[in-house]
Structures are given as structure tokens and as C-alpha cells.
Image (cartoon, rainbow, N blue to C red):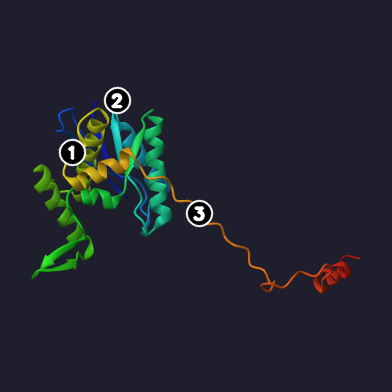
Amino acid sequence: MRFVGIDPATETGVVALDEDGDPELETSIIGKGEKKPGGITLEQRISLENQLFRLLMPDDEVLKEGIANGSQMLITTAQIHGGLEGMIARKNLTFDKVQPLAVKKYVGVTGYKIIDGKKVRLEGEKEKKAAMAAGALKHFEYSHPNNNVVDAYIIAKICEAVYRVRRGKQLSDYPKYQQEVIDSIINPPPPKKKKKKTEKTNKRPGKPVARESHTQNTEQACLF
């Protein structure tokens, strides 16, 4: 059995941990084929999916990062995520999802840095990836030159924690912020109900509707 973390993207990070939580597989995969500026071609997507399928094993516990809210290139992102999920299903495996903000939270990354005692938002992918790398090093003494692999490793560690808590390990053994991430996967909140739209009418408040309105007579004249 392995704990597998998947960080989907045009370059997808995949990490598998053994039963002791040590890395057994650390890689990033890129779809082969004709390139498309600012996106991914069907040929590349199929290649990406097939590579993941070959990496997965029958007894894997899988955790996959979900789509970030407000994600740019949403259609391309959804295609990649959907295709990879299909490969997991084809391997007869089930999987959980973890939101990108929760992955950051698990290693104490808040999206801010402290400069002269003030909170300043992290700017750009380079700073954000550096913060994730620092978080992985601090919490797990783990480092890797590929940022996608680092993210996938953190996801795999969350997968391991979820598995162990489901089988009796005390949630309190983890720091509070990690407890919240683990619990959000084991006990996800119910989906929010959509608010019903109220129909707008031209009726004035308190004014009764006439039994035979002018509008009704006009419609009858048009029908006949």
C-alpha cells in the first residue's frame, strides 16, 4: 500500500509514500505531443493521463488537489483534473480531494510574510512556491528541486494522515491547523444550498390584480 499525492497541472506532480511515510516515488509528468500556447492539446492531455495511469498501483490510497477558486484558464484546468480523475477510476481506485488553500495551511503557509513586523502578501509564483518549499522543509525535513513534486509530497503526507486518523489515530496528535485540514477531508461540510430567485412582478404592493386586465385582453386579441 502507498499514500499517493497528486498535484494536477500541465506539469503534474506525483509522489507516493510507502507504509512508513517515506518517499517511494517522486516525479513530475508532462504530456507529450504538439504544444499549444497557454493551454494543453488533446494529444498532450491523453499522454499525461496515460502516464499517471501507469504510475498508479492497485492498493494505492490517493489524495488529489482540487481546483482552486478563481482559477485562471478554468476550462483547461477542469479538463486536466477530469482526465486524471478518470485514470484513477480506471485503476479501480477511490480518491479524496483537498483544496489548494488547505495544502498550504497544512505546512503553515498563510499567503503572507512578515516584514518589519507587518504582514505583507506574498507576490508572484516564485515567492509562493518558496514558501511551500520552506513549509515542507520545516514540517517534514523534505526538499526537492521541483516545486510540483514538493506540493505533491505535502498532499501525500495529508493522505497518510487522513488514512491513519480514519483507522484510529488520534486527531489531537497533529497540530491544530493540520487537524482542521484532516477533518475537512474526513468530514466535509455539506454543499451550500442555492438561494431561490424571487420572481419579479409588475404588481404594486397592496394593489389587487384585476380579474380581466388590459394585458389579458390585448393577448386575447392577438390570439384570435
C-alpha separation, residue under disc 2 versus residue under disc 1: 27 Å
* Lateral position of residue 31 relative to residue 141, left or right: right
Q: What residue do we see at 22% from left, 43% from top?
A: 179
Q: Which dot, 2 or 1, sits closer to the camera?
A: 1
Out of 123 and 14, give the one closest to the viewer. 123
Of callouts 3 and 1, which one flags the residue occurring earlier in the amino acid sequence?
1
102 is higher (above) or lower (below) than 168? below
C-alpha separation, residue under disc 3 versus residue under disc 1: 35 Å
Amino acid identity at mark 2: Asp
Q: What residue do we see at 39% from left, 28% from top?
A: 92
Q: Is mark 2 on a helix, strand or loop?
A: loop
Q: Quadrant of the N terminus?
A: top left
The image quadrant that residue 168 belongs to is top left
What x and y, as percent, mark residue 38? 36, 59
Of callouts 2 and 1, which one flags the residue occurring earlier in the amino acid sequence?
2
Which residue position holds label 1?
172
Amino acid identity at mark 3: Lys
Q: Is mark 1 on a helix, strand or loop?
A: helix
Pointer 2 with pointer 1, Cβ within 8 A: no
Which residue position holds label 2?
59
Circle 3 crowding by C-alpha within 10 Å: few under 14, some 14–19, many from 20: few
Q: What element carries label 3?
A: loop
Q: What residue do we see at 68% from left, 74% from top?
A: 204
What x and y, as percent, mark residue 6? 28, 41
Amino acid identity at mark 1: Ser
209 is higher (above) or lower (below) than 194? below
Q: Which dot, 2 or 3, sits closer to the camera?
A: 3
C-alpha separation, residue under disc 2 versus residue under disc 3: 38 Å
Circle 2 crowding by C-alpha within 10 Å: few under 14, some 14–19, many from 20: few
Which residue position holds label 3?
194
